[in-house]
Amino acid sequence: MIEYLIQDKKYSLSYKELKEEYLKNVFYTDEEFIENLPSAIHLACIICWFKETPTDNCLNDKGIIHELAHLLHIGKEPNVDIQEIRELFKTQLELV
């Protein structure tokens, strides 16, 4: 268990649980991934923070958090490719 402070409030994080949640999302069907999109966005935020991913890398138009927000907000638009987003999720958020 990893413990940390943010604005004098104590939080804890389990690397094992984080990795299990990541793998669960990676192996979801597309339909399950869409159904659990709010959870996937939250997980992406935590993993990007944990991995110290530069903000620009995860929030720019092709960053994982921004792409997940596109999927949530505009979903089936032709320029939103779920397969590209899922591959980005898998590679940018990978935990070893």
Image (tube, rainbow, N blue to C red):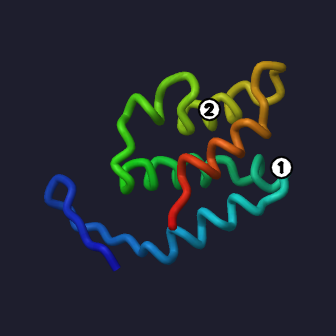
Residue 5 falls in image quadrant: bottom left
Image position, residue 66 (x, y; %) = 55, 31
- Which mark sits nearer the N-terminus, 1 or 2? 1
Which residue corresponds to the image point at 52% horizontal and 49% vertical from the top-left?
Answer: 44
Which residue corresponds to the image point at 83% horizontal and 28% vertical from the top-left?
Answer: 76
In the depicted structure, whether residue 21 falls above or below residue 26 = below
Image position, residue 24 (x, y; %) = 69, 67
Q: Is residue 42 left or right of residue 31?
A: left
In the depicted structure, whether residue 83 falls above or below residue 22 = above
Q: Residue furthest left?
A: 8
Residue type at the position of mark 1:
Asp
Specify the quadrant that holds the N terminus.
Answer: bottom left
Residue type at the position of mark 2:
Glu
In the depicted structure, whether residue 44 falls above or below residue 82 = below
**Marks 1 and 2, Cα distance to the nearest angstrom?**
15 Å
Label 1: how many residues lie within 10 Å, few (<14), some (14-19) or many (20+)? some
- Residue that badge 1 annotates: 30
For residue 67, which numbered disc appears in the image?
2
